[in-house]
Image (tube, coloured by chain):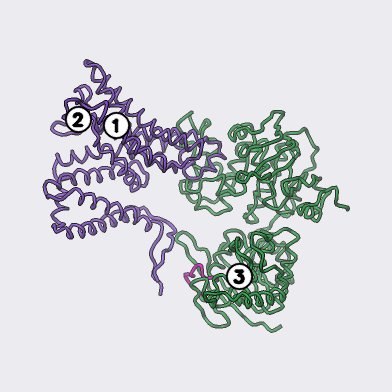
Chain colours: A green, B purple
Amino acid sequence: MNKITVLKATDITKKFPETVANEGINFSLHKGEIHALLGENGAGKTTFMNILYGIYMPTKGEILINDKPVRIKTPLDAINNGIGMIHQHFMLVEPLTVLENIVLGLKEQGIVVDRKAAKKKLKEIAELYSLEVNPDKKIWQLSVGEQQKVEIIKVLFRGANILILDEPTAVLRPQETEPLFDILRKMKKDGKAIIFITHKLDEVMAVSDKISILRKGRLVKTVDKEGVTKRQLAEMMVGRAVLFEFEKKEKKAKETLLSVENLDVYSTQQGVKVVEDVNFTVKKGEILGIAGISGNGQQAIVQTIAGLRRAVKGKIVFEGKNITNKSPRYIAQIGINYIPADRIGMGLASDLSCIDNAIMRNYYKKPISSSWIINYKKSEEHTRRIVDMFNIAVADIFAPIKLLSGGNMQKLLFARELFENPKLLIASYPTRGLDIASTEFVRKQMLKIRDEDMSVILISEDLDEILSISDRIAVVYKGKIMGIADAREIDKNTIGLMMAGTRLEDITL
Amino acid sequence: MIYFEKRENISAKLKVVIPVVSLIIGILFGALAIVVVGINPYAVYKSLFVNAFGSWYAFSETLVAATPLMLITAGLILVFKMGIWNIGAYGQYIMGAIFSSYFAIFMPPGVSKPLMLTLMFAGGAIGGAIWAVIPAILKVFWEVNEVITTLLLNYIALYVLKFLMYGPWKNPKSFGFPLSKPFPSSAQLPVLFEHTRINLGLAFALISIIVIWFIIKKTNFGYEVRVIGNNPTTAKYAGISVGKNIIIAMAISGALAGIAGMVQVSGIIHFLQVKINANYGYTSIIVAWISYLNPALCLLSSILFGGLESGGYSIQISMRVSYGIVGLIESIALFSIVGAQIFLNYKLRWKK
């Protein structure tokens, strides 16, 4: 195979006032290659991609495209050099059509758009890579997978030869992943070079040719996929051996801790039913997994349990007490703690210090507060205990929590809730955005709670996580539960079908 | 091309340098305006400074003007920290002045001074608090924007005051001027330093700053205020009653503005009239802002703006410039200080 180098980055270093995000990265990308960039959160993947795409300027280093040195100062420079980026959060205008989104901001476009020519070019691209979308549909009418296709077409339309995909599978259903990989393979065959950012090892093994591993801002190694195992990759990412399987002790089901009966919840704005006739129970010492594509009502269910949304119909019973529509504080005090999905939006106050964030659950209780004055010495001790116990990397507990990395913020939030010794811990996507080491830690903690006869409701999109941690799994689709099954008796495929709207009883095994 | 780049961190030095530099730039622009009207700007500024800080008497007048600014700003800091935009200190100040004047005007003669002043103090606090709690309740229960309601209540307060002054509360011996009858000496706040107008109100102001600092830094309530201000969703999640806290904080803020109104009529004017310097209510918004919502800095900025007020008042006479020029200088200074805050978060970059 003749290897034409299309992109070469040498000695890329990016220093920020407090940290070095990239240091001496040497990276080369060849024509017709899918190159996975693997690394934990905070390893410097995003910084490096932002440098290639002109969002940051490197402190040091050189980028060559087709053997010519270039200076990429803006995303426009990147596009002109044939680099296209598909962001994790799509950059599409929802009320406009596919075609309009694609021609939007095209330089060669005059005042009047030549729709016919544009449509023709769009069709050609779509056919070549099997990226079928209806050019006249509005973006909001498309599924997430289709929107992603539009993003890819947009980039190809601008003549990109180098495509950067930032965690493209994070937003997809399990069934949509394989078609995306097929598209990538077609593009590769056509001579495009693709950088694929991820931290999911299965995907790396499925689709990439080469793998570069980043750790702590440095490129640890670039390897061929052939002759490397998942375990080796994980070790390179984390810098030590990693546990994949957890020891889950066999337990007998005990008495019911929580039961949810005939629950209906409406959305806050439009008054649409987002949860419909939901029934389930959680037993003592059990982990109940709730699987489903995000936005199918799982947040509404748990937020209603936590007292943050109103149940319109139905009953929530905890330890025999009816707790339907009680206040969030009451619910926290009887032993239900909730880890929200979007921790910046709910759960943390990002401009306040780590201390202020760490005492959020007990600032009004002794010994932190003597009824109305907060004892900051005690608060500080409490914070340090949490930080030490969970090994959270905090430079200064008096500094705003937003200066921490996403993973450390999540650890602090998780630790704060766990510290309250909940009888029931509700964890929404507790490992989303966490690196391997932190993920392992959080999962172990959940299993530990279970061993101590406390219970967990785990919401996750990561089927491996749900399957390996939970005792029972409920799958939600459009606000309804498609079925609840024992985790040992269900497989990924069945869950995937249920996530797409098939009832468990309708699936013939 | 010139463009803005977001600063990655904001140093403490920058927090001082930027307002100072922008104030200097503001002063220079003000000078330009003074030149246009044909006066020597150096002489105006010199006179302004001398009249604000040049002598003990001048400084005492600066402190007199700074007193209501400190009281109002202390309260505004509390609500602004919460993300509640109380623009109504103007009206709360007027209501405080009206409620406290009621006692001064209508109590039978012979009431002891401590009782009279206590009643007036309480009246001022309650009057201001009522005027602030109305918009707070509207916000909490019906999500009515507090910026609009507090602003509109300012006009209502002003017209209530005008009604009283031209109508029922007018002194029959005032020759038709809209004034109340003069306050008895029992209704006048004691002067703290002889030959000045500095009165007990300054002590109220200093105490209020300390109390607000203590509330924000040390109490459960202050903690809740900070969490709500930073992220109301997180506050709800943490079980904090957002509505209750908004009402309490607004009541405190209104009460302090009302006390400022009481201090002005009881300590300085000694009767009630239409012109009771309620504009302090608006100036305090700026004072709170340039103090970075920090109670300690509010002491300094209040004195600075008190100096502008009192010095500006004096140069009308000494320099024969119209008060309009003073207002202009003040506005340009405010404009540049507030405008320059963008440089705290962003820096300018040049790129070819």
Most foreground residue, A319 or A421: A319
Task: Give the SS element for disc 2.
Answer: loop
Task: Give the SS element for disc 3.
Answer: helix
The chain ID associated with circle 2 is: B
Mark 1, mark 3: which one is toward the viewer? 1
Instruction: Give residue B61's position: percent from left, percent from top.
Output: 18, 39
Which residue sits at x=54%, y=65%? A47
**Callout 1 environment at 10 Å: few (<14), some (14 to 19), or many (20+)?**
some
Q: How many marks?
A: 3
Q: Decide which of tag 1 and tag 2 comes sooner along the chain.
A: 1
Most foreground residue, A336 or A21: A336
On the image, numbered disc 1 is attached to which residue?
B163
Which residue sits at x=68%, y=79%? A191
Calculate the distance from the C-alpha at mark 1 to the C-alpha at mark 2. 34 Å
On the image, numbered disc 3 is attached to which residue?
A102
Residue B192 tag number: 2
* Main SS class of the magenta portion in the image: loop
Which residue sits at x=69%, y=64%? A146
Instruction: Give residue A408's position: percent from left, percent from top.
Output: 57, 51
Calculate the distance from the C-alpha at mark 2 to the C-alpha at mark 3. 74 Å
Which residue sits at x=54%, y=78%? A108
* Above-or-below relation of B99 to A176: above
Q: Amino acid at mark 3?
A: Ile
